[in-house]
Amino acid sequence: MFRPFVLFLVLLLLADSARAGWIVIKNETKTAVVIQEVADKPGKRGKQVRLLPGEVYREFHLLAGEKKYEVYDPKAPTKPLCRETLSWKATDLTFKVELVEKVVKLSPAKPVLLASADQPPMKR
């Protein structure tokens, strides 16, 4: 009696993880930037992540959702260059930090190929 219940729970967890996805943010500017998650409550912030030009940050999310991010210049961390709310379904999504007409934007982008256990290592 106990084994079918455990099997059911395992299958349920596997079904949820099949819907999971990666949020990927790529720095397509020519300078380093800092991205940081911002909560709705004042004073609450996520960790700061510094991205060099061309560098990619990725974060795993089990379910669909929405997060607010701010992009900063590391040399002037008190003034955000942009603020964006990113929404996603439970699939892989890619966003890019780009400079458009002297304005920094965080916008959707083409998917970035990420190394995974399923893929052979890249040749150099």
Image (cartoon, rainbow, N blue to C red):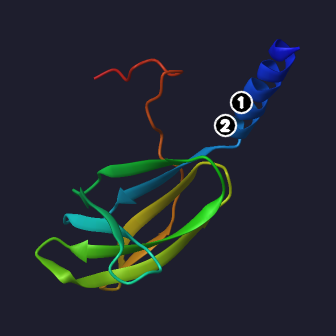
Q: In this view, does 19 lie above or below 50?
A: above
Structural crowding at the residue carrying mark 2, measured as other residues with C-alpha within 10 Å and reported as few (<14), some (14–19) or many (≥20):
some
Q: What element carries label 1?
A: helix
User: Mark number for residue 6?
Assistant: none
Residue of label 1: 14
Classify mark 1: residues with Cα within 10 Å, few (<14), some (14-19) or many (20+). few
Query: What x and y, as percent, mark residue 50?
Result: 23, 59
Question: Disc count in the image?
Answer: 2
Seen from the viewer's position, the closer of residues 70 and 108 is: 70
Residue 83 image position (x, y, % from top left): 41, 81
Which quadrant holds the C terminus? top left
Tell which residue pokes out farthest to the front in this image: 1
Residue, far left = 75
Q: Position of residue 69 (x, y in %)?
A: 41, 72
Choose top left, top right, bottom left or bottom right for residue 106: bottom left
Q: Nearer the viewer, residue 4 or 97?
A: 4
The residue sitting at 25% across, 75% down in the picture is 72
Residue 79 vs residue 118: left or right? left
User: Image point 48% across, 61% down: which residue?
Assistant: 95
Q: Mark 2 near mark 1, Cβ–Cβ under 8 Å?
A: yes
Q: 106 left or right of 3?
A: left
Q: Residue at 35% of width from left, 85% of height from top?
A: 101
Circle 2 residue: 17
Q: How far apart are marks 2 and 1 (CA)?
A: 5 Å
At mark 2, the secondary structure is helix
Q: In this view, does 1 lie above or below 8?
A: above
Residue drawn 65% across the image and 49% down it:
91
Where does residue 48 sit, x and y in percent of width and height? 26, 63
Residue 1 vs 69, above or below: the answer is above
User: What amino acid is labelled 1 in the image?
Assistant: Leu
Q: What's under tag 2, amino acid-wise?
A: Ser
